[in-house]
Amino acid sequence: MDSMVSRYWWGHSNNTRKIHWKSWEALCTPKWVGGLGFRKLAAFNKAMLAKQGWRLLKFPNSLLASLLRAKYYLHADFLSSSIGSNPSFTWCSIFDAKPLL
């Protein structure tokens, strides 16, 4: 996704490339520091997955928390859970973001 955004930003037309005025790192710095505030989508995705993990902790009686608890961490809490056997893509993604919590 980052490469698609950068291709749009620095795209080309008629076999000529646009000038790269700043590096991608500089574009991704916050606006208040002098960048353009673009988000690094991998880091943003990891933050959103960690937020889902936080919701599992904060709202243990929600439907998602109940389903994941029944399948992956029945006798433990989310922070001390393990990846388990044959995990779903959703559980693997949330589990990988657990160190951020």
Image: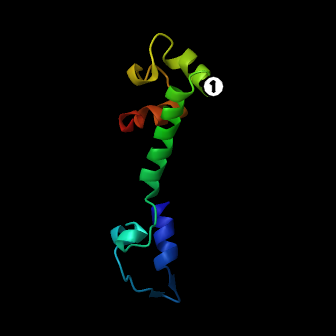
Counting every numbered tag in the picture gives 1
Name the image quarter holding residue 83.
Answer: top left
In the rendered image, residue 87, in percent from the top left (x then y), is placed at: 50, 25
Name the image quarter holding residue 67.
Answer: top right
Crowding near the residue tagged with mark 1, few <14, some 14–19, many ≥20 C-alpha atoms within 10 Å? few
Q: Is residue 38 above or below residue 98?
A: below
The residue sitting at 42% across, 70% down in the picture is 31
Q: Is residue 75 above or below residue 77?
A: above
| View extreme (top): residue | 75
Image colouring: rainbow
Query: Which amino acid type corresponds to the residue marked 1 in the rendered image?
Result: Ser
In the rendered image, residue 48, in percent from the top left (x then y), is placed at: 50, 45
Reading the image, the residue beneath label 1 is 62
Identify the element where label 1 is drawn: loop
Asked whether 14 or 72 is in front, the reply is: 72
Q: Is residue 68 left or right of residue 21?
A: right
Residue 88 in sight in this render: no
Q: Is residue 14 above or below residue 90?
A: below
Name the image quarter holding residue 21.
Answer: bottom left
Q: Is residue 27 above or below residue 17?
A: above
In the rendered image, residue 28, in percent from the top left (x then y), is placed at: 40, 66
The residue sitting at 46% across, 78% down in the picture is 10
The residue sitting at 50% across, 60% down in the picture is 1
Asked whether 60 or 23 is in front, the reply is: 60
Q: Is residue 35 left or right of residue 4?
A: left
The residue sitting at 65% across, 25% down in the picture is 63
Q: Is residue 24 left or right of residue 73?
A: left
In the rendered image, residue 64, in percent from the top left (x then y), is placed at: 61, 27
Q: Quadrant of the C terminus?
A: top left
